[in-house]
Image: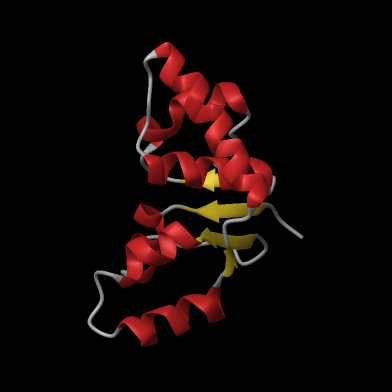
């Protein structure tokens, strides 16, 4: 078995456009935030959600993710380096669930490496 990957929205879009291949040996997950970001831009929301549910493991927010994101938010606020909430929650999801994040938007997440975020390369 390959790696456990959390696919960010940018890479998910590239995957569905045929511009990105995902290693079939890896386990691919998406955050519920990514589900929302993806389906809101589609013509048929229910069909898009069904396809995502069949293709990926969806990670739903839970207390552990929310607590981790809140702890990091407080630390970042104190240091004046806040990131967007959706990126913080996606990053916290990856950390809590021990998934490597697949994204092209590494600048959005770089600050989270200090808290344990690992990128998939």
Q: Quadrant of residue 92?
A: top right
Asked if residue 10 is positioned above or below residue 113 in the image, the reply reads below
Q: Is residue 46 left or right of residue 121?
A: left
Residue 105 % position (x, y): 36, 40
Nearest the eye: 78 or 41: 78
* Quarter of the image that includes the N terminus: bottom right
Residue 22 % position (x, y): 52, 62
Q: Which residue shows up at 52% across the image and 41% down it?
A: 91
Asked if residue 67 is positioned above or below residue 13 in the image, the reply reads above
* Quarter of the image that includes the C terminus: top right
Q: Which residue shows up at 49% across the image and 45% down it?
A: 89
Q: Quadrant of residue 36?
A: bottom left
Snapshot colouring: secondary structure
Residue 100 visible in rendering: no
Q: How many marks?
A: 0
- Report the residue that reaches farthest toward the top: 79
Residue 60 visible in rendering: yes
Residue 88 % position (x, y): 46, 39
Residue 49 % position (x, y): 42, 79
Nearest the eye: 80 or 57: 80
């Amino acid at each position: 078995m390959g790696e456990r990957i959390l696919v960010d929205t940018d890479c998910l879009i590239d995957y569905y456009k045929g511009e990105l291949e995902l290693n079939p040996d890896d386990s691919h997950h998406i955050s519920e935030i990514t589900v929302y970001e993806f389906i809101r831009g589609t013509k048929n929301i229910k069909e898009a959600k069904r396809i995502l549910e069949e293709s990926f493991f969806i990670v739903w927010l839970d207390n552990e993710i929310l607590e981790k994101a809140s702890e990091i938010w407080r630390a970042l606020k104190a240091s004046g380096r806040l990131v967007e909430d959706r990126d913080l929650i996606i990053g916290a999801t990856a950390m809590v669930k021990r998934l490597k994040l697949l994204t092209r938007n590494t600048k959005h997440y770089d600050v989270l490496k200090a808290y344990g975020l690992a990128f998939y390369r």
